Image (tube, coloured by chain):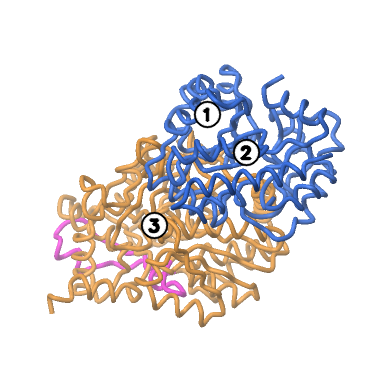
Amino acid sequence: MAGSYRLPDSRGRFGAYGGRYVPETLMEPLIELEEAYTRLRGDRTFREELEALLRDYAGRPTPLYFAERLTEKLGGAKIYLKREDLAFTGAHKINNALGQALLAKRMGKTRLVAETGAGQHGVATATVAARMGFRCAIYMGAEDMARQAVNVYRMRLLGAEVRRVDSGSKTLKDAINEALRDWATNVRDTHYLLGSAVGPHPYPMIVRDFQSVIGREIRAQILEKEGRLPDLVVACVGGGSNAIGTFYPFIEDRGVKLVGVEAGGEGLETGRHAASLAGGSPGILHGMYSYVMQDEHGQIKTTHSISAGLDYPGVGPEHAFLKESGRAEYVAVGDREALEAFLTLTRLEGIMPALEPAHAIAYVMEVAPTMRRDDIIVLTLSGRGDKDLDIVSQSIGGLF
Amino acid sequence: MSNISDLFRDSLASGRAALIGYLTAGDPGLDQTRMYAEALVEGGVDVLELGVPFSDPVADGVTIQASAQRALTSRTKLPDVLRLSSIIKKSLEAPVVILSYLNPIYRMGFRRFFEEASSSGVDGVVVPDLPVEESADFREEARRAGVDTIFLASPTTSDSRLDQILRASQGFVYLVSLLGVTGVRRELSPEASRLLERVRARRERPYLAVGFGVSSPEHVAALVKGGAEGVIVGSALVKIVEQNLSNPSKCSEQLQSFAAKLKEATKL
């Protein structure tokens, strides 16, 4: 399929998935956004401005780090970590936030709204709002505000208004609902800076494109270090933005296996998880047709994950397509395994990962020993773990 | 012509705009919703709009969100709402419109949904998160079953998309009076009259009704004066339900008298 992957199509579809299922008030703003993006992505000044910000402000390229001690300990494939935890503000979210904020500026918008789960996207959005002079409101579920209190404070210091969401499950899903409602109300001056590769077209495409800098850098860096492409590329999947940004530049390289790791929570069989692809079914949520966690009557289910950033009952439509086409594989890792992986990486490499990529690390710890020593794994370490120390200490604090 | 457009025609011929009243089915229980529907019709509501509760109602403000939550707590599902429609239809002549977000309908299957809706006496369906561009299969099944598809147009809708929406809407087109979500408002949005004028200027169009934020007899009178052929009142009715959760008979009385006041304001 070399050179043949051209999705989404003109209707915003990745195969059957994607599309645009939103209240009428948001239709024209989405069309306007799509047109602006289509015009600007080929615009040289826009690209140069974004590249300069990514380099000088966000600290890109982020390193591709050979995790020597983790590799030795597991005794199998060589493991490289793509250090998005070293990107400015501590996670990959800044890549998309900068891109969309520049876009919003060119569209003449003066205000940004965003949802946040773990708080990383909220912090990234509040940061670019400060940098570019936007007013900014961040919606965050009450439960997430409690478990990610440090990020709430960071957003407020940056001048953003953090709005508490008490509806539904009080997590990321409900924060997206509120952000959509805000956008519909303030659509003339506001850009909705959606943080994951979910939602109505064109968001899954825009977020993927802005996050693809991760995969493009991995490609160049691994070719330089190893002279060949990796055998396995792994990333965690909540909505799926760091994963799609990691996978996209490798989609046409059939020799590169792509694995997305979802949050298995307390186990798929318990129903208390957030693995939409592994444990959900096709449906419509937040403007997209994709895999969602729902009951037999189409009500969206409450999810559970120790990681706020993965605690979401839907997934980006391109992941649904990659799953069905067989190009990528999706697995689930539970809370406990993620915590163990968190501790392993911290003790072996001195790198404290966020709980989201800790899920991906747990998967790599499982498969690396089964692979050959000259095989290569690249794992996107999507963010750093500082924000999760409270949760970690509550969960494993008893060990010390 | 459908029951809904007949109703609009007759109502306008008798010098009134059509009054459409919304209740979330199952808030706080299906028996109450049946009682309240009767009270609304008794008070003068012409078309009953029954909401299917959904976990993620992105087009709704806090009042209807809370109402949906109560209905979900009482375990109201889409098949229950269809059953409620068939029960209501046995005693009332008012056309029934179902309002549902897309996922519950998708999950049931479009064909099965429209067949069951049709046999339950449902006259029309409104899906607030289904734009006309994504609606081909949906409309095909609605046509087979003889159920009206009612689409929404909003102040942000462009002229070219407005034409598509007007062509796809049967019974009436649902004009969103404001930028934002449903909910009680003190003032009518100035967007409402601009949208009304735009739609009235179209030669070929279905009847038009205005909803979102329509909260008082004064709002109704102003919209009718501005050319609305129908008005949709939702959150203001749901608020009455919310304020009388433990007293259904008082709730019925209040709904009926409020509906009568709204009806009074529909005079052309």
Disc 1 vs disc 2: which is toward the camera? 1
**Residue tagged by mark 1?**
B88
Q: Is mark 2 on a helix, strand or loop?
A: loop
Question: What residue is rendered at 41% in x and 67% in y?
Answer: A142
> Closest to the observer: B251 or B49?
B251
Q: Which amino acid does the dot numbered 1 rest on?
A: Ile
**Residue tagged by mark 2?**
B131
Q: Which amino acid does the dot numbered 3 rest on?
A: Ser
Q: Are marks 1 and 2 on the same chain?
A: yes
**Residue tagged by mark 3?**
A169
Quadrant of the rendering where the N terminus of chain A is positioned: top left
Q: Residue B56 carries which label?
A: none
Q: Earlier in the sequence, mark 1 or mark 2?
A: 1
Image: A141 above or below B213: below
Label 2 Cα crowd, 10 Å radius (few <14 / some 14-19 / many 20+): many
- Give the Cα distance between marks 1 and 2: 29 Å
Q: Does the magenta stretch include residue A66?
A: yes
Disc 1 vs disc 3: which is toward the camera? 1
Q: In the rendered image, what is the letter of the chain coloured blue?
A: B
Q: Is mark 1 on a helix, strand or loop?
A: helix
x and y percentages locating residue A144 in the rendered image: 39, 67
Left or right for A153, reference B147: left
Chain A: colour as depicted: orange
Magenta-highlighted residues? A62-91
Q: Mark 1 lies on which chain?
A: B
Q: Are marks 1 and 3 on the same chain?
A: no
